[in-house]
Image: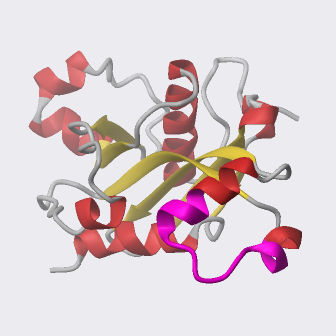
Amino acid sequence: MSNISTSGTPMAASPLTRAVLEIDEYAATLGWDQPARLFALVDTAKLRAQEPQLAAQLGLDGTDSGAATLTPVEQDEVPAGTPLDEFLGTIAWPDAVAGCALAVERQMLPPSAEAAVPQGMSEKQLAAWVAKHPDRQEVRMTVAVLRDGARESAVRLREKDSASEVLTGADLVPGLAEALAATFVE
């Protein structure tokens, strides 16, 4: 079953899940081998009320069903060459931002390959080793967190690059969710 409705919008139970799927779909339109992308998540109704010109620019015409929604607003590009954890440590969000999300591509190994990982490798050596492993899989992970602690993730495998194959769940990428949640700690 597809997670896309006949109108083209993601079907999901919560506004956070809908926002994650919207970001995943946007990233999918850009193709693979993209840099990490950071998004602020703002309450759509508040955005319309406080920033009507920006809302209009984003195509938020007020025709949604009235349900609570979040609007992803892409931020400036994540600086190339800066480790993601260091970059996230520099972020402070204004009060108007309800949450944030990050879409990032990585290579993963199945749990069965963990025993074969050589010990004592640097991060760079480990990345090269994973890149050559025959069981590696390329994935795009989209992770979002809200100020209140809610979390959601979407994971898309490159070999199954279809909206109907996207996995979602709150705990799929816990380390990245923790790092994003830390951007709201004062």
**Could you say which is closer to the camera, residue 42 or residue 180?**
180
Q: Which residues are magenta?
A: 114-127
Instruction: Residue 145 in the image: state x and y as whole percent.
Output: 42, 63
- The answer to whether residue 135 is above or below residue 24 is below
Q: How is the image coloured?
A: secondary structure
Question: Can residue 13 be seen by looking at this rendering?
Answer: no
The residue lying at 57 percent from left, 29 percent from top is: 25
Q: Is residue 128 left or right of residue 48?
A: right
- The answer to whether residue 185 is above or below residue 38 is below
Q: Is residue 2 left or right of residue 107?
A: right
**Could you say which is closer to the camera, residue 30 or residue 130?**
130
Instruction: Residue 88 in the image: state x and y as whole percent.
Output: 27, 63
Taking the magenta stretch, the answer to whether it contains residue 120 is yes
Question: What quarter of the picture does the C terminus occupy?
Answer: bottom left
The residue lying at 32 percent from left, 17 percent from top is: 59
**Could you say which is closer to the camera, residue 114 or residue 118?**
118
- The answer to whether residue 88 is above or below residue 39 is below
Taking the magenta stretch, the answer to whether it contains residue 56 is no
Instruction: Residue 61 in the image: state x and y as whole percent.
Output: 32, 19
Instruction: Residue 111 in the image: state x and y as whole percent.
Output: 82, 71
The residue lying at 28 percent from left, 21 percent from top is: 58
Tell me the quarter of the picture where residue 5 sits: top right
Q: State the count of labels.
A: 0
Question: What quarter of the picture does the N terminus occupy?
Answer: top right
Question: Can residue 101 be seen by looking at this rendering?
Answer: yes
- The answer to whether residue 162 is above or below residue 130 is above
The residue lying at 32 percent from left, 23 percent from top is: 60
**Could you say which is closer to the camera, residue 94 or residue 13?**
94
Tell me the quarter of the picture where residue 83 sits: bottom left
